[in-house]
Image: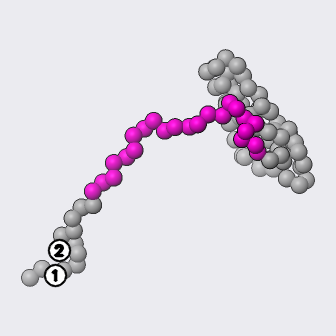
């Protein structure tokens, strides 16, 4: 971070030193733009999705951010099966 300073997100992504990571981040951000365009009809560029690299994050500056809620029901907690004397380690007569 010290060597790169404050970079635009696109420039930062291009300077990621590992090919696999750089390709992954590029694909994720590209598909996020495509899906946003397909769902809302308004493509949002990467520079609008990420602040300049090296600047502190300020959540109040992002009014579009939504609270994520899981709609799946919570899994039921299984009842603990009773332990039999044989499984507790007692010897049978």
Q: Residue at x 27, y 61 (%)?
A: 80
Q: Which mark is residue 44?
A: none
Q: Main secondary structure of the magenta part?
A: loop
Q: Residue at x 84, y 48 (%)?
A: 54
Q: Is residue 64 left or right of residue 89?
A: right
Q: Note whether residue 69 is visible.
A: yes
Which residue is outermost to the front? 60
Mark toward the viewer: 2 or 1: 2
Evaluate if marks 2 and 1 touch, with contact meaning CB atoms under 8 Å apart.
no
Quadrant the C terminus occupies: bottom left
Which residue is outermost to the top? 41
Q: Secondary structure at mark 1?
A: loop
Q: Nearer the viewer, residue 85 or 66?
A: 66
Q: Is residue 39 left or right of residue 59?
A: left
Q: Looking at the picture, does residue 86 appear above or below residue 72?
A: below
Which residue is outermost to the left? 93
Q: Residue at x 87, y 42 (%)?
A: 7
Please give the residue where the numbered disc 2 appears in the rendered image. Answer: 85
Q: Earlier in the sequence, mark 2 or mark 1?
A: 2
User: x, y (%) of residue 55?
Assistant: 83, 46
Q: Which mark is residue 91?
A: 1
Q: Looking at the picture, does residue 41 appear above or below residue 4?
A: above
The residues colored magenta run 57-79
Q: Note whether residue 14 is visible.
A: no
User: x, y (%) of residue 66?
Assistant: 61, 34
User: x, y (%) of residue 76?
Assistant: 33, 48
Q: Residues within 10 Å of mark 2 (few under 14, many from 20)?
A: few
Q: Nearer the viewer, residue 41 or 10?
A: 41
Magenta span contains residue 80: no
Whole-number angstrom distance, CA of label 2 to CA of label 1: 8 Å
Quarter assignment of residue 83:
bottom left
User: x, y (%) of residue 87?
Assistant: 22, 72
């Amino acid at each position: 971070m010290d060597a790169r300073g404050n970079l635009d997100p696109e420039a930062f992504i291009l300077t990621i030193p590992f090919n696999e990571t750089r390709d992954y981040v590029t694909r994720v951000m590209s598909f996020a733009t495509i899906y946003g365009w397909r769902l809302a009809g308004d493509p949002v560029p990467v520079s609008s999705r990420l602040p300049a690299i090296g600047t502190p994050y300020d959540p109040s500056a992002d009014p579009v951010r939504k609270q994520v809620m899981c709609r799946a029901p919570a899994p039921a907690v299984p009842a603990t099966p009773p332990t039999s004397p044989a499984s507790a380690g007692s010897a049978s007569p």
